[in-house]
């Protein structure tokens, strides 16, 4: 029998294969994290402007069947704030790809078993502090107990791995690096430390607030020795956003995402579809490609695939943070989808 031809892949203009889809289901969120949206909130999208679960699933199916995408992450805003989000998981599960969700965890205690039964594999929970007073300050709500309960529920439900994402900001929560590491080690969680990026709607980001990935690892290494020195762990690049380093005692690992000081743009393999149906090729993209309008006007899968491919072909080489010509995107993180 003659060998079957390899499935086509989606490649951008810089030779990077794209195979990871971030699928936002809502721009809404009950928290007001200081790096994500202003304290007063934002004007939410009208319900009619959101893609339906069936529309989201159609676009995801197109990416998987046409180009072999192997990962889908459901995001928001806060995805669990959209009613019945497990129904989208049920629609995506038959695609047979790695299916994950990023959440603030506030509703996870009730939803974790239902999401697992629907087909969700793993979850990332945002947790920037272990102090209740500081959580209220950083996130605008007194919700730390709910988040911690949500993390425990995700572990109990069998979602694996459960990762904890912490955005570290100098002078705000960098004194908790070791405490966060201990928390994750004690519970068998994967800790992901993220450099502070200029995505907040109010423009509060300044370079001096960034704690570099190297500094984060060094500070943890002093208390919980790593299997490799921090400098070695960050050298030579890595295949995914996080540089992952095991602890020397074998009790898990810590990952750092150096989006500012050592961005992984040259290896970026993802695109995003916003809750209102726009393709974004980068968190910091200044242009979007509309899919909702053509889809609701009767566009075929070939038409939609052409629009996605054209957007990917125009993907820039990188986000240019820290350069004089960097331009902050008009949309906030909750409007884009992490």
Image: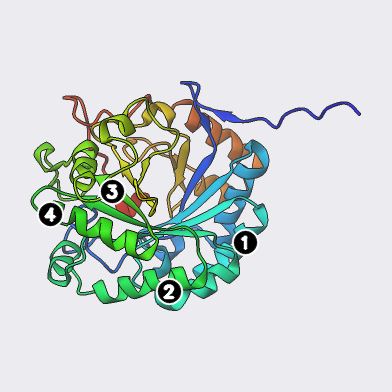
Q: Which residue is mark 3?
A: 193
Cα distance between the residues tagged 4 and 1: 42 Å
Question: Helix, strand, or loop for circle 2?
Answer: helix
Q: Earlier in the sequence, mark 3 or mark 2?
A: 2
Q: Which residue is mark 4?
A: 175
- Please state which of residues 32 and 261 is positioned toward the viewer in this rendering: 261
Q: Is residue 40 visible?
A: yes
Numbered disc total: 4
Question: Helix, strand, or loop for circle 3?
Answer: strand
Mark number for residue 91?
1
Examine the image and state in which quarter residue 47 appears. Answer: bottom left
Q: Earlier in the sequence, mark 2 or mark 4?
A: 2
Q: Nearer the viewer, mark 1 or mark 2?
A: 2
Q: Earlier in the sequence, mark 4 or mark 3?
A: 4
Q: Are marks 1 and 2 in contact (CB under 8 Å)?
A: no
- Residue at (26% x, 43% y) in the render: 330
Q: Quadrant of the N terminus?
A: top right
- Residue at (34% x, 41% y) in the render: 227
- Residue at (12% x, 54% y) in the render: 175
- Please state which of residues 123 and 84 is positioned toward the viewer in this rendering: 123
Q: Which residue is mark 2?
A: 153
Q: Nearer the viewer, mark 4 or mark 1?
A: 4
Q: Earlier in the sequence, mark 4 or mark 1?
A: 1
């Amino acid at each position: 029998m003659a060998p079957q031809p390899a499935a086509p892949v989606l490649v951008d203009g810089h030779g990077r294969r794209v195979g990871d889809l971030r699928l936002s289901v809502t721009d809404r969120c009950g928290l007001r994290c200081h790096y994500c949206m202003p304290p007063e909130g934002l004007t939410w999208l009208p319900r009619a402007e959101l893609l339906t679960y069936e529309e989201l699933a159609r676009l995801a199916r197109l990416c998987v069947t046409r180009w072999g995408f192997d990962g889908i992450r459901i995001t928001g805003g806060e995805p669990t704030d959209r009613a019945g989000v497990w129904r989208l998981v049920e629609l995506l599960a038959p695609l047979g790809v790695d299916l994950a969700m990023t959440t603030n965890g506030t509703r996870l205690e009730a939803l974790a078993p239902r999401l697992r039964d629907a087909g969700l594999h793993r979850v990332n929970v945002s947790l920037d502090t272990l102090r209740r007073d500081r959580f209220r300050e950083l996130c605008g709500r007194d919700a730390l107990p709910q988040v911690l309960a949500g993390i425990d529920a995700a572990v109990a439900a069998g979602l694996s791995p459960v990762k904890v994402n912490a955005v570290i900001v100098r002078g705000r929560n960098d004194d908790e690096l070791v405490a966060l590491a201990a928390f994750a080690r004690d519970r068998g969680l994967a800790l992901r430390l993220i450099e502070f990026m200029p995505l907040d709607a109010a423009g509060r980001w300044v370079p001096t607030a960034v704690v570099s990935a190297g500094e984060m690892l060094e500070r943890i290494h002093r208390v919980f020795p790593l299997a490799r020195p921090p400098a070695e762990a960050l050298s030579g690049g890595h295949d995914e956003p996080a540089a992952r380093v095991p602890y020397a005692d074998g009790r898990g690992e810590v990952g750092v995402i150096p989006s500012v000081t050592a961005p992984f743009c040259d290896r970026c393999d993802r695109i995003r579809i916003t809750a209102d149906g726009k393709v974004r090729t980068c968190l910091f993209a200044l242009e979007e490609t509309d899919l909702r309008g053509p889809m609701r006007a009767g566009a075929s899968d070939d038409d939609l695939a052409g629009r996605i491919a054209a957007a990917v072909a125009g993907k820039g080489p990188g986000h240019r943070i820290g350069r004089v010509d960097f331009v902050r995107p008009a949309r906030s993180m909750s409007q884009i989808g992490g």
